[in-house]
Image (cartoon, grey):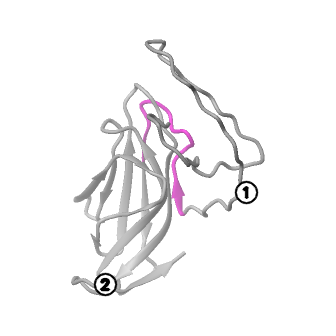
């Protein structure tokens, strides 16, 4: 969902060959509307885990990703795309012992890295309210952090 007056705006990647654009209004005021003037072909990321798109109201799900590096002391995950209702539909990041490390909300079309998570196991949760839905999430990578100090070097696993 886009609100405001952005220019040069591109949607997130949509699977398939067809898409539908819909203008929603609450009827309180009127405005210019929109003009879709371009369409582009793009590759969809390969998701290690993903929510339904869009996710449902009152949706609860959790996923666990294990870093394939047996020596990983810390791991991070990358969201290729993340769009959840702020502040009501949080994505939580936890370690293998269910200690919450991070809570993420909002629209992150250019991707987003999680905070470092101790160990190899990263748990992701999505818990939504009943008011509205968004696109959801797609995690496409998990990496090993080899140092607790910046700059860090990372080893990527697809």
Label of residue 41 in the image: 1
Q: Which residue lies furthest to the right in this view?
A: 17
Residue 64: percent from left, percent from top:
42, 61
Residue 96 vs 26, above or below: the answer is below
Residue 99: image quadrant is bottom left
| Residue under the image location 52 percent in, 45 percent down | 7
**Mark number displayed over residue 69:** none
Q: Residues within 10 Å of mark 2 (few under 14, many from 20)?
A: few
Badge 2 is on which residue? Answer: 152
Residue 29 falls in image quadrant: top left
x, y percentage for residue 87? 30, 38
Residue 75 drawn at (x, y percent)? 35, 74
- Queried whether the magenta region covers residue 115, the answer comes back as no
Whether residue 38 is situated above or below residue 98 in the rendered picture: above
Foreground mark, 2 or 1? 1
Q: Tell whether 74 sits left or right of 46.
A: left
Residue beneath the point at 50% across and 33% down: 56
Question: In what element is the residue under mark 2?
Answer: loop
Residue at disc 1, secondary structure = loop
Magenta residues, start to end: 48-61
Q: Does the magenta stretch include residue 55?
A: yes
How many residues crowd mark 1 within 10 Å: few (<14), some (14–19), many (20+)?
Answer: few
């Amino acid at each position: 969902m886009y609100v405001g007056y952005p220019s040069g705006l591109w949607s997130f990647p949509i699977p398939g060959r067809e898409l539908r654009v819909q203008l929603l209004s609450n009827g309180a005021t009127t405005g210019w509307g929109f003009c879709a003037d371009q369409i582009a072909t793009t590759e969809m990321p390969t998701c290690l885990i993903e929510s339904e798109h869009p996710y449902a109201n009152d949706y609860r799900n959790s996923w666990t990703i294990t870093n394939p590096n047996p020596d990983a002391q810390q791991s991070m995950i990358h969201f290729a795309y993340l769009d959840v209702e702020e502040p009501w539909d949080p994505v939580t990041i936890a370690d293998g012992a269910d200690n919450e490390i991070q809570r993420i909300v909002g629209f992150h079309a250019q991707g987003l890295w999680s905070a470092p998570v101790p160990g190899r196991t990263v748990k992701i949760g999505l818990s939504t309210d009943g008011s509205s839905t968004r696109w959801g999430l797609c995690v496409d990578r998990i990496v090993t952090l080899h140092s607790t100090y910046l700059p860090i070097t990372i080893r990527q696993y697809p």
